[in-house]
Amino acid sequence: MDSGVRVSELTLLILRIGFLVALWVFVFFVVYAVRSDLFGQRVRKLPAPQPASTPGAQSFLTSAQPRLAPEASQDIAPADGTPLRLVITSGDLAGQELPLQGDVITIGRSPDSSLVIQDDYTSTHHARLEVRGGSWLLRDLDSTNGTTLAGSRVSSPVPIPLNTPITVGATTFEVRR
């Protein structure tokens, strides 16, 4: 006599199907997580940029170059009248210079950022430069890889001294006169 428990064929079939469904759900979540890590969030596409209206004007509206938003129009300059500029010192955009205009400049991979940086270490909305009390402050926007000022990680808004390296992802830049 067989003293073991007998399981019906229907029960075995249901267990097999349940195991396969659980396995495929697991595979789906793994693929989704890998896709999210590699490609980030989906962002909406903006219409193609229009060429600069002035002959010889430099346009920063290509995807390979940084871009300042057109709504940033008011210059915030030091007391001596010299306009400040953002100089990219390393990374894919090294050598680019942008005037600091307006009172907020957002930095990230998103096309709606004021300064668009396309690299794997920059978050969609990574950091922000903003004017408070007449001086520029740097704020990290809870980015994955963080933002550093002179090698120190930024955890709260900090004033930006001139000629001090700021690192966002694989790009380093400085505020200069």
Image: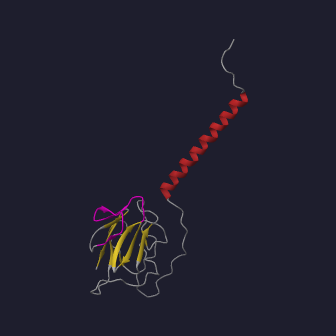
Location of residue 105 in the rendering, given as x and y in whole percent from the top left corner: 41, 75
Nearer to me, 24 or 77: 77
Q: Residue visible at 47% across and 87% down?
A: 53
Q: Main secondary structure of the magenta part?
A: loop
Location of residue 27 in the rendering, given as x and y in whole percent from the top left corner: 57, 45
Nearer to me, 116 or 62: 116
Q: Residue visible at 61% across and 43% down?
A: 24
User: Which quadrant holds residue 82?
Assistant: bottom left
Q: Is residue 78 magenta?
A: no
Q: Is residue 126 found left or right of 166 in the rendered image?
A: right
Q: Residue visible at 28% across and 65% down?
A: 150
User: Which quadrant holds residue 79?
Assistant: bottom left
Segment tinted magenta in the rendering: 141-160
Residue at far top of view: 1
Location of residue 1 in the rendering, given as x and y in whole percent from the top left corner: 69, 11
User: Which quadrant holds residue 138?
Assistant: bottom left
